[in-house]
Image: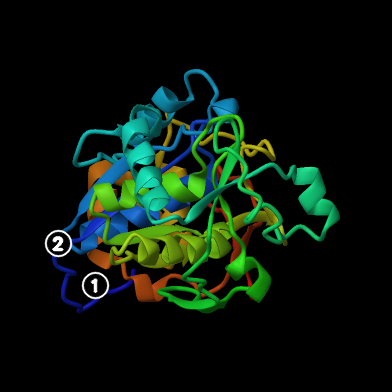
């Protein structure tokens, strides 16, 4: 077993796990949940759960409740009331009004098909056309482009110049608030200090960092965990029909998540209660021991205690 890291806890740590209710939790989701939980608790911090259901077109009925039930089955109890993005429209509208008052928003009538035909990066075509904002997509004028930043796990992250400088959507033409806007508004409102999540969000993080700057708020520290993949470049996801983790027998998957995160649990750990397994993990967890790779391939079935992993370099 690994030894306890001798590091001082981060003061006033506030972390969060923010799943989208588009299906049940799979092993990749569990890694993100456990990683964010252990990082918060090893720093004597607060761990929150936010249901990111703002994209109602992707919400599966009953998924949010199932996610919360699964977290409870794995002993991952949140410290404050669960937040649902669909109940926070006033916050997002206020954020857009703030940006609009700074004359940083414009309406865009370009379709995804048109943008894709031009190379996939929006070139600011509508910026000076003065379209009405009514029933239009809204874009933010990028004034704080982030081309690189340092991640606590992945190290130096570099973003392409075109993508970094793109005027990105903050509200869709169908009236739904865009993810990039709402996630930053939520993190500011909830005073989040640390974000531990999957490496598939390395590029969106650059935009979120720029928006924190635009809103004159200190950004959280980011740590992007390796992705669990079935094969290189093929991450486990709800869209890829990754199997749901078991609620009736959580210990094997929990043990595998510990190993995935760089802990060295002995097989006998499953003889303990879920609470004691997590207590052991909190005492032995260190962010420094998380593998510094973008992907880790899962080599055996997820419900096996003998799950094997293969690290894949960035």
Q: Nearer the viewer, mark 1 or mark 2?
A: 2
Q: Residues within 10 Å of mark 1 (few under 14, many from 20)?
A: few
- Which residue appears at 30% of the width and 64% of the height? 216
Where residue 144 sits: x, y (%)? 47, 71
- Which disc is residue 12 wearing? 2
- Which residue appears at 77% of the width and 52% of the height? 115
- Which residue appears at 45% of the width and 60% of the height? 208
- Which disc is residue 23 wearing? none
Q: Helix, strand or loop at disc 1?
A: loop
Where residue 268 sits: x, y (%)? 36, 53
Q: Is residue 102 visible?
A: yes
Sequence-earlier tag: 1 or 2 = 1
Location of the C terminus (image quadrant)? bottom right
Where residue 108 sits: x, y (%)? 64, 45
Q: Residue extending furthest right?
A: 117
Q: Is residue 82 left or right of residue 305?
A: left
Quarter of the image holding residue 229? bottom right
Could you say which is closer to the camera, residue 159 or residue 98? 98
Q: Is residue 74 visible?
A: no
Q: Helix, strand or loop at disc 2?
A: loop
Tell me the residue that label 1 is attached to.
Answer: 4
Q: Name the colour scheme.
A: rainbow
Q: Residues within 10 Å of mark 2 (few under 14, many from 20)?
A: some
Q: Is residue 25 left or right of residue 284?
A: right
- Which residue appears at 55% of the width and 53% of the height? 306
Q: CA distance from mark 1 to mark 2?
A: 21 Å
Q: Is residue 273 left or right of residue 159?
A: left
Q: Is mark 1 in CB contact (under 8 Å) with mark 2?
A: no
Could you say which is closer to the camera, residue 111 or residue 282? 111
Q: Residue extending furthest top?
A: 61
Where residue 168 sits: x, y (%)? 58, 55
């Amino acid at each position: 077993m690994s030894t306890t890291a001798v590091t001082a806890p981060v003061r006033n740590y506030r972390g969060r796990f923010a799943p989208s209710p588009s299906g049940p939790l799979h092993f990749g989701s569990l890694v993100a949940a456990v990683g964010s939980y252990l990082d918060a608790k090893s720093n004597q911090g607060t761990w929150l759960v936010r249901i990111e259901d703002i994209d109602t077109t992707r919400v599966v009925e009953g998924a949010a409740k199932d996610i919360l039930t699964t977290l409870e089955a794995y002993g991952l109890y949140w410290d404050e009331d669960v937040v649902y993005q669909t109940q926070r429209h006033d916050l997002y509208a206020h954020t857009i009004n703030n940006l609009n008052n700074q004359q940083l928003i414009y309406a865009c009538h370009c379709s995804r098909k048109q943008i894709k035909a031009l190379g996939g990066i929006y070139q600011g075509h509508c910026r000076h056309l003065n379209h009405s904002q009514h029933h239009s997509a809204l874009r933010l004028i990028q004034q704080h482009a982030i081309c690189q930043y340092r991640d606590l796990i992945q190290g130096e992250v570099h973003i392409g110049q075109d993508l970094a400088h793109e005027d990105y959507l903050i509200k869709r033409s169908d009236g739904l608030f865009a993810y990039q806007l709402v996630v930053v508004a939520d993190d500011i409102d909830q005073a989040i200090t640390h974000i531990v999540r999957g490496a598939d969000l390395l590029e969106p993080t650059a935009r979120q960092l720029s928006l924190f700057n635009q809103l004159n708020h200190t950004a959280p520290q980011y740590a992007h965990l390796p992705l669990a993949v079935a094969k290189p470049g093929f991450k486990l996801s709800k869209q890829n029909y990754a199997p749901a983790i078991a609620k009736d027998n959580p210990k094997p998957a929990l043990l595998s998540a510990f190993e995935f995160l760089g802990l060295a649990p002995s097989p006998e750990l499953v003889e303990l209660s879920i609470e004691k397994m997590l207590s052991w993990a909190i005492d032995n967890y260190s962010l420094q021991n998380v593998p510094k790779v973008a992907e880790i391939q899962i080599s055996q079935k997820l419900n096996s205690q003998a799950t094997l992993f293969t690290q894949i370099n960035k």
